[in-house]
Amino acid sequence: MAAVEAARRGRRVAVLERADRPGKKILISGGGRANFTNLHTQPGNFLSANPHFAKSALARYTPSDFIRLVERHRIAYHEKTLGQLFCDGSAQQIVDMLMRECDEAGARVFLSVAIHSVRRNDSSGAFNIEARDRIFSAPRLIVATGGLSIPKIGATAFGYQIARQFGVRLEPCRPALVPLTLAGVEHTEFADLTGVSAPVVVSCGKHSFQEKMLFTHRGLSGPAVLQISSYWKSPQPIQIDWSPGQTFLAPFRIPDARRDRAGLRSALRRHFPARLADRLGELALPRSWTNHALDELERRLHNWPFTPSGTEGYEKAEVTAGGVSTSALSAQTMECLSVPGLYFIGEVVDVTGQLGGFNFQWAWASGAAAGRAV
């Protein structure tokens, strides 16, 4: 996006891509259909040390702007849930669209370029990028290298290395939108439910998300858990409301109702898959069947604590939180305040979107901001 915007303005643009094909992260997103934006994008959908930083770029390149681009290229798409837009066909359509835009604007894309060094000429101020068999020189350098997540498709720390080289401040990095792991008793109690999912509300501190949660062989996943993982820090607990807005134990309030283990199992099976219902019934079985005991059980089912032991790391994380500090950049242009001509955009910056197309929208918006500024 930065290359397209800059080339449209008559700038000579070279895109240096280390991989042998462009857009690998786009290609694997959304189950191969690219969740390319979200209709409901707002600054509140992003994490950053400065929660206001993203406002300018997001306001100047909106989901509607990218949708118009998609429609101009006649790519069919649909809304799945919660404003998430996906291609009807393949994510390859989005990559092809961006490559056509580069070609039409005159931006050249060089694939399989292994960069050995980035230096700045003291006299001219130009950036010299040394690759294996050539040197690229330009007065402006935009770093769009992504984060550390999903190293199997080529993620590296190169963008952060460039920032350090030029003395640009970094916020600590961590995996985000990532499954959480359990250990000890909690892992033992739930590990055999691998593959079972349920709609829940997951909370951590002031943040909560209502979506599905999935049990895995290592812990917890699913959209609700991926969302809360971006806000979770060890050793915080998370809380699960197993059935928000519903009363589990209403059948026990009926006169002459059966108040025993079998009755509890039957009541829970009305809300959950049988295996999950039976496990929760075993773990939460009250010592008595008094109204007070039932009230306590009801509260526990709406506020069930887990204490994750960690995350599944960058290998399974969809994005990287942290990165180039927003305090070091212009919110309008993405240019480094202390290094004129050097820009950082996208995931390498300390702006991290929630699940659902927000991170792509930040990539488009921050890229457009830099491309319009160089």
Image (cartoon, rainbow, N blue to C red):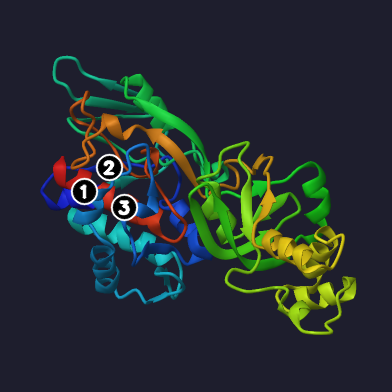
- Mark pair 1, 3: CA separation: 9 Å
Please state which amino acid type lies under the numbered disc 3: Pro
Q: Quadrant of residue 357?
A: bottom left
Q: Report how many numbered discs are placed on residues in the image.
A: 3
State if disc 2 and disc 3 touch (CB < 8 Å): no
Residue at 22% over, 24% down? 339
Q: Is residue 371 above or below residue 356?
A: above
Mark 1 nearby-residue class (10 Å; few <14, some 14–19, many ≥20) = some
Q: Hey, which residue is sitting farthest top in the picture?
A: 122
Q: Which residue is mark 2?
A: 53
Which sits earlier in the primary sequence, circle 3 or circle 2?
A: 3
User: Around disc 3, counting alpha carbons within 10 Å, would you say few (fewer than 14), some (14 to 19), or many (20 or more)?
Assistant: many
Q: Residue at x 61, y 60 (%)?
A: 222
Q: Quadrant of the C terminus?
A: top left
Q: Quadrant of residue 116?
A: top left
Residue 362: give x, y in percent of width and height.
33, 51
Dot 3 corresponds to which residue?
Answer: 43
Which residue is nearer to you in this view: 197 or 166? 197
Q: Which residue is mark 1?
A: 56
- Does the rendering let one see residue 115? no
Q: Is residue 257 visible?
A: yes
Instruction: Determine whether label 1 and label 2 are within 8 Å by CB.
Output: yes
How far apart are the two marked residues, 1 and 2, measured between alpha carbons? 7 Å
Depicted 127 relative to depicted 146: above or below:
above
